Image (tube, rainbow, N blue to C red):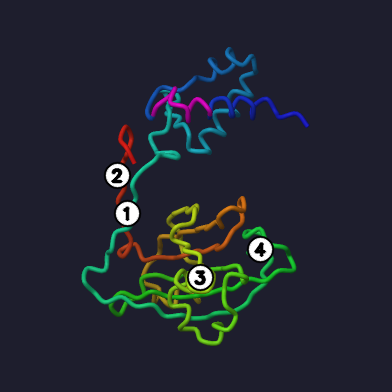
């Protein structure tokens, strides 16, 4: 099956964006330049620019043109989570540990529809306040089933996996997406006492070594903004 022309053009332009030919804030190709270079109609050129904008690769400014987006994409940085507890004591409470077979989660984890996984639901508290609600969905074959009877065995999910499977999740590759979101589930909101309209929302996939794209854990977390922070340091031009 042939690839649509606009997708071919997007692939070429994305290579240029990622290859150092174009830099953040640079003037990008105009609609007419794309038409001329790739011998396509203005309709196709507009579609290319629209998709690149949706991908947050370019920014279109009325009356000025199209520019390479200033946001970082696939940049190498040093990342540090900030501890925002301000000296208050921290604690974890395991709410539930259960074997599940939700089809949506199974698909997300790349498992068969007949498989099951372990769902661990926890809250983290700073002082007397709930700062975080998290759900970890883990492949069952990396957990000792004899530990399922005691929820306290899952205060730290990664320590549990490390002890049971000899695998350190902190050293595994992962992808994580962080956004701002409202909490629609009233059961989750109850743990936060309904104190905030917006929360930090993170989704994370942790991958197993050796096996391509095999997922160990799919996790999602809601955090109070006041207890969340990060610091990044660019290593552009330096050594890692």
Q: Circle 3 sits on which residue?
A: 161
Q: From the viewer's perspective, is the residue at label 2 or at label 4 nearer?
A: 2
How far apart are the alpha carbons under marks 1 and 2?
A: 9 Å
Q: From the viewer's perspective, is the residue at label 1 or at label 4 nearer?
A: 1
The numbered mark, 3 or 2, whose residue comes first in the sequence reads 3
**Residue extending farthest right:** 1
Q: Secondary structure at mark 2?
A: strand
Question: As displayed, is residue 202 above or below residue 67?
Answer: below
How far apart are the alpha carbons under marks 3 and 2?
A: 30 Å
- Residue 164: x %, y % from top left: 53, 74
How far apart are the alpha carbons under marks 3 and 4?
A: 23 Å
Disc 1 and disc 2 in contact, CB within 8 angstroms? yes
- Residue 12: x %, y % from top left: 57, 25
The numbered mark, 3 or 4, whose residue comes first in the sequence reads 4
Disc 3 and disc 4 in contact, CB within 8 angstroms? no
Q: Circle 4 sits on which residue?
A: 104
- Which label was assigned to residue 233? 2
Q: How many marks?
A: 4
Residue 22 on the magenta span: yes
- Residue 155: x %, y % from top left: 43, 77
- Residue 122: x %, y % from top left: 46, 75
Quarter of the image that includes the C terminus: top left
Q: Secondary structure at mark 3?
A: helix
The magenta segment: 15-23
Q: Secondary structure at mark 1?
A: strand
Q: Circle 1 sits on which residue?
A: 80
Residue 67 found in image quarter: top left
């Amino acid at each position: 099956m042939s690839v649509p022309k606009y997708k071919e053009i997007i692939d070429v332009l994305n290579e240029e964006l990622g290859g150092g030919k174009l830099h953040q804030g640079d003037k990008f190709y105009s609609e007419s330049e794309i038409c001329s270079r790739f011998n396509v109609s203005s309709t196709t050129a507009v579609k290319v620019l629209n998709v690149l904008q949706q991908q947050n690769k370019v920014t279109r400014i009325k009356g000025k043109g199209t520019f390479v987006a200033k946001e970082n994409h696939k940049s190498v940085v040093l990342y540090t989570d900030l501890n925002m507890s301000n000296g208050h004591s921290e604690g974890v409470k395991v709410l539930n540990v259960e074997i599940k077979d939700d089809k949506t989660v199974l698909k997300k984890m790349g498992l068969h529809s007949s498989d099951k996984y372990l769902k661990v639901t926890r809250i983290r508290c700073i002082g007397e306040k709930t700062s975080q609600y998290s759900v970890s969905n883990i492949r069952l074959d990396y957990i000792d089933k004899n530990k399922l009877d005691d929820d306290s065995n899952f205060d730290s999910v990664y320590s549990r996996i490390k002890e049971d499977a000899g695998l350190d999740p902190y050293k595994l590759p992962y992808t994580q997406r962080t956004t701002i979101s409202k909490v629609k589930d009233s059961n989750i909101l109850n743990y936060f006492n309904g104190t905030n309209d917006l929360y930090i929302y993170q989704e994370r996939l942790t991958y197993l070594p050796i096996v391509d794209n095999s997922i160990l854990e799919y996790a999602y977390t809601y955090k109070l903004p006041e207890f969340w922070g990060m610091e990044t340091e660019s290593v552009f031009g330096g050594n890692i």
